[in-house]
Image: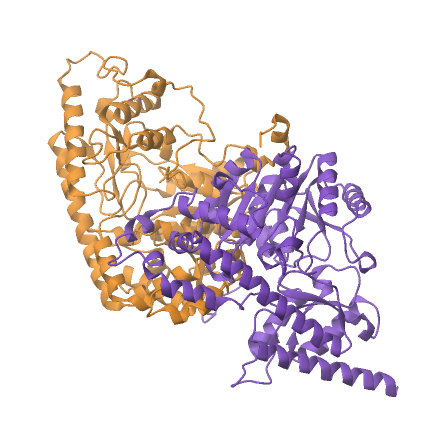
Chain colours: A orange, B purple
């Protein structure tokens, strides 16, 4: 079964282009982790994974619920009688009780301030599938969506790879706290028009990945008016909605719709998922919620390409309609995230590392500009490689999020236990301490000096093998 | 929808407004009639009997028995200790145990005559996703895939809708029992060229839907030679491979490749799923098995849009690695399907209706051309309408499967109890008698 060179030409353009995004240097960090993963007892010198935005803080609550609710599984003696009906159910509307439970859950996450209609809930293969699906519905190949930077790197693949859509970054930077301004939007829109690009909409993530902040109501309203005015779509990825842990309170676009006069609802679409809020990325629960009837209709048909397993729908229908459980879970989830966030922030403050103040998310946006020799992306990547290979932390460089200014790094903190957080903070403290002790004027860090690893890993021209032998590499999403 | 919303004033994509989703076909209209008036033995005995849905409901008891006897294997264990690892697992390689179990199961379905490498198994949420995904990888918008007629109506959506790829039919007809011939292949290729479509591959379903027959080894060899000559791909959708009534009658393209020592294998890709053989369409378990490294890598990346729930992978990994269970299941399932098939064939024969001699699948390909008023597509649809609304049976007209000869219908028999099948056969008998009496009295 040898691959012949000539058969390369036999594949499509989509198959042979780079838009899957995996050739980004961003993935080197993951490889370093996969080759040498940290383990408290087996491998305490390994790389700590801080590049994966997972929520592992509340599994005990969920496990307890599962133990107490055997009927929610179709495999237990209590639930087995439902097996054949569930196993047979492939209707792309989804189980009614699942849709009801999701609508209810989404409403609870927003403090009951807005109600969701189960008939508008569409399923897809995780938010990855949902984001791609909405783009297939809204944009033709060559069309464009505006997107504020910094943004989740996976969007390039999710929104553009197979759809042929293109992204127009709308830059923001720390000078105005990464705010999305009306001026920036207008400027980007105008330029696109001049370049003859057909802008179909604006996509935002709220709460933001990687910033970890929520949008205030006024900004949200202005985004709604901007898109309404230009008659373009507004897609709001609210995947981190339940990770808000401190004020200001979360405001969803669904709430704002109710308050904007003459709002063109049919231009507004929400993307949701349980991967972050509940910590279920493996279950592939992606939701498209559109206020546009046509989109719901067509999107529903498209969901055939990524339906949620009926087994999973069944279990979640039961879990998410347990009102007491959901109330407790959401409260405890926020509390634990806040605690973890505060612990991590304190640790960074002790070594004068500043970070972008955040009230949500599973990560923080860390400012390491002071450690850059030159304020360039080149130096950012060099620093990043040092952090991976010397400090042994897989963090994500701001450039991979299309950040317009160098020196920012996203660091995830909700995917590990407390002890590992301590170890990570110690390593950071040691590293920064070392760096800041060096005399001014001298190069702050010299990657070639204290090499204790093979220089092969440092080869910046190495081409990523598509046949990476990493069996458990979570390359599925560049979170 | 509850809320009144004014008409949208901004356009959706071309894909969104096109009708290539295919749902306006009579194939789906019959489903609607069923949904509005579904047959139930007790509560609605005169409702529409669903015979248009190729589901396998004959072997659920075997699956349930397995779960009863192995509770620890299928849940997350007592106290749910494996839960969090499973809930977090989103690696697009899939659970290794599951991939291995799938490869082993596929081997068993082929009587151990060929080996499958778990590293080449790519997982997708159903064969629907697998077929679309492969099309994205093998063809560009505007290109064409050649597909033998009659074919599964869903292909119009799966292969064409979002991909922008065209289907050019390879015409097959009853004169030679709907076999695919080299002449038909060449003809289709020329048709595509005449329409200025670049042909990227041939997609066959083996065993065939809607015909319910396996493709003979010699024909498979011819197809393989054809695609090699033209330097194009071959996709073999083997979703019904476990539904062949007798194992020895099925030859997978994998066996042919092995016989050729995998020469030119990198153009061949197999699609499989558990929706038909195991009767688990709700679980969304599809796979792509490709002999082409680049396709495997790319397909794996693309599967990000359509991964199988890790909860489901976990359940099936344990079930499918139980060799005793799978061997017994495969054998029992075959036997039950064969019995069901014989029952419906006999029942139809006693009503004077002939079917194509089938040896696989969850349906039979019924010839009602003698009953057509006119031997045209319109005549066929008229008859179909009568069967749907008077006889209250939802069966699928051949035209919705792009059959070039009018009068053929696909009738599913594995998605109901034997009793319901009896009732359906009675209804057909009465209907045919009525028509014959009417024709004779004219």
Relative to A431, residue B390 above or below: below
| Residue closest to the far left | A350
Identity of the residue drawn at 59% across and 75% down = B34
Residue A391, quarter of picture: top left
Can residue A404 be seen from the camera position used here? Answer: no
Query: Which of B288/A407 is in front?
Result: B288
* Quadrant the N terminus of chain A occupies: top right
Identify which residue is drawn at 20% across, 62% down: A328
Q: In which quarter of the image is the C terminus of chain A?
A: top left
Q: Is there any visible trace of residue B346 in the rendered image? A: yes
Taking B82 as reference, is B378 above or below it?
below
Taking depth in this image into account, of A65 and A226 the one nearest to the observer is A65
Residue A470's x, y, as percent?
39, 33
Instruction: Name the spot of residue A87 as percent of width and height, x first.
Output: 46, 64
Residue B272 at what x, y percent from top left?
A: 56, 51
Q: Which of A463 and A2 is in front in this view?
A: A2
Q: In this view, does B271 lie to the left or right of B172?
A: left
In-image side of B70 versus A189 (left or right): left
**Direction bottom: furthest residue:** B441
């Amino acid at each position: 079964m040898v691959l012949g060179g000539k058969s390369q030409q036999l594949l499509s353009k989509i198959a042979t282009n780079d838009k899957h995004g995996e050739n980004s240097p961003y993935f080197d960090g993951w490889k370093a982790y996969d080759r040498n993963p940290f383990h408290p007892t087996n491998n305490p010198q390994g790389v700590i994974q801080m590049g994966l935005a997972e929520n592992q803080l509340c599994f005990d609550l969920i496990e307890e619920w599962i133990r107490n609710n055997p009927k929610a599984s179709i495999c237990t003696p209590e639930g087995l009688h439902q097996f054949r009906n569930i196993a047979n159910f492939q209707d792309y509307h989804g189980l009614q009780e699942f849709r009801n439970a999701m609508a209810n859950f989404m409403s609870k996450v927003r403090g009951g301030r807005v109600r969701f209609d189960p008939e508008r809930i569409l399923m897809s293969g995780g938010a990855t599938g949902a984001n791609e699906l909405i783009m297939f519905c809204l944009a033709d190949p060559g069309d464009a969506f505006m997107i504020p930077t910094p943004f989740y790197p996976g969007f390039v693949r999710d929104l553009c790879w197979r759809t042929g859509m293109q992204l127009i970054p709308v830059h923001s930077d720390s000078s105005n706290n990464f705010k999305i301004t009306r001026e920036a939007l207008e400027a980007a829109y105008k330029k696109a028009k001049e370049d003859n690009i057909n802008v179909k909409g604006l996509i935002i993530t709220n709460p933001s990945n990687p910033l970890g902040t929520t949008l205030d109501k006024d900004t949200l309203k202005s985004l709604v008016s901007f898109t309404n005015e230009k008659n373009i779509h507004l897609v709001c990825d609210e995947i981190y909605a339940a990770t808000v842990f401190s004020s200001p309170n979360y405001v969803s676009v669904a709430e704002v719709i109710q308050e904007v006069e003459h709002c063109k609802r049919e231009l507004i679409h929400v993307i949701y998922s349980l991967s972050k809020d509940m910590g279920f990325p493996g279950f592939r629960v992606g939701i498209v919620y559109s206020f546009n009837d046509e989109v719901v209709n067509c999107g529903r048909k498209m969901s055939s390409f990524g339906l949620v397993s009926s087994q999973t729908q069944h279990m979640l229908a039961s879990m998410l309609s347990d009102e007491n459980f959901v109330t407790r879970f959401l409260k405890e989830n926020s509390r634990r995230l806040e605690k973890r966030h505060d612990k991590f922030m304190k640790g960074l403050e002790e070594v004068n590392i500043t970070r972008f103040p955040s009230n949500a998310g599973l990560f923080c946006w860390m400012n390491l500009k002071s450690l850059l020799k030159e304020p360039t992306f080149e130096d950012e990547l060099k620093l990043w490689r040092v952090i991976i290979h010397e400090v042994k932390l897989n963090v994500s460089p701001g450039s991979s999020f299309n950040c317009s200014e160098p020196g920012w790094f996203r660091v995830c903190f909700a995917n590990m236990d407390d002890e590992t957080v301590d170890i990570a903070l110690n390593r950071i403290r040691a590293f920064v301490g070392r760096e800041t002790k060096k005399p001014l004027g001298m190069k702050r860090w010299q990657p070639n000096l204290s090499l204790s690893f093979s220089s092969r890993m440092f080869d910046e021209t190495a081409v990523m093998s598509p046949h990476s032998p990493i069996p458990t590499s979570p390359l599925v999403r560049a979170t | 929808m509850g809320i009144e919303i004014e008409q949208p004033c901004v356009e959706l994509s071309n894909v969104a407004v096109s009708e290539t989703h295919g749902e306006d076909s009579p194939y789906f209209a019959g489903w609607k009639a069923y949904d509005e008036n579904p047959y139930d033995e007790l509560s609605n005995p005169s409702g529409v009997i669903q015979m248009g849905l190729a589901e396998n409901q004959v072997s659920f008891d075997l699956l349930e028995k397995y779960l009863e006897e192995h509770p620890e294997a299928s849940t997350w264990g007592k106290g749910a200790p494996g839960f969090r690892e499973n809930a977090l697992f989103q690696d697009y390689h899939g659970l290794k145990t599951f991939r291995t179990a799938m490869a082993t199961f596929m081997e068993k379905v082929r009587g151990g005559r060929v080996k499958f490498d778990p590293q080449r198994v790519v997982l997708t949420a159903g064969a629907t996703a697998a077929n679309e995904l492969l099309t994205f990888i093998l063809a560009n918008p505007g290109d064409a895939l050649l597909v033998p007629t009659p074919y599964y109506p869903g292909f119009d959506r799966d292969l064409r809708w979002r991909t922008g790829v065209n289907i050019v039919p390879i015409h097959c007809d009853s004169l030679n029992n709907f076999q695919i011939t080299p002449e038909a292949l060449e003809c289709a290729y020329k048709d595509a060229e005449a329409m200025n479509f670049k042909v990227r591959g041939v997609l066959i379903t083996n065993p065939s839907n809607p015909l319910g027959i396996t493709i003979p080894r010699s024909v498979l060899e011819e197809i393989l030679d054809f695609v090699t000559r033209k330097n194009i791909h071959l996709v073999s959708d083997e979703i019904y491979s476990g539904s062949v009534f007798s194992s020895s009658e099925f030859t997978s393209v994998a066996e042919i490749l092995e016989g050729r020592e995998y020469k030119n294998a990198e153009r061949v890709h197999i699609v499989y799923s558990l929706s038909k053989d195991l009767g688990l369409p709700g679980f969304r378990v599809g796979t792509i098995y490709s002999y082409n490294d680049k396709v495997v890598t790319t397909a794996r990346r693309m599967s990000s849009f359509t991964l199988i729930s890790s909860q489901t992978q976990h359940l099936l990994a344990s079930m499918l690695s139980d060799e005793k269970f799978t061997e017994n299941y495969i054998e029992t399932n075959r036997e039950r399907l064969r019995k069901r098939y014989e029952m419906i064939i006999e029942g139809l024969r006693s009503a004077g209706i002939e079917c194509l001699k089938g040896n696989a699948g969850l349906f039979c390909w019924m010839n009602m051309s003698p009953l057509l008023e006119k031997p045209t597509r319109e005549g066929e649809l008229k008859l179909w309408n009568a069967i749907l609304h008077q006889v209250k049976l939802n069966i699928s007209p051949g035209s919705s499967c792009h059959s070039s000869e009018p009068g053929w219908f696909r009738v599913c028999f594995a998605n109901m109890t034997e009793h319901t099948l009896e009732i359906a056969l009675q209804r057909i008998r009465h209907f045919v008698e009525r028509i014959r009496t009417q024709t004779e009295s004219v």
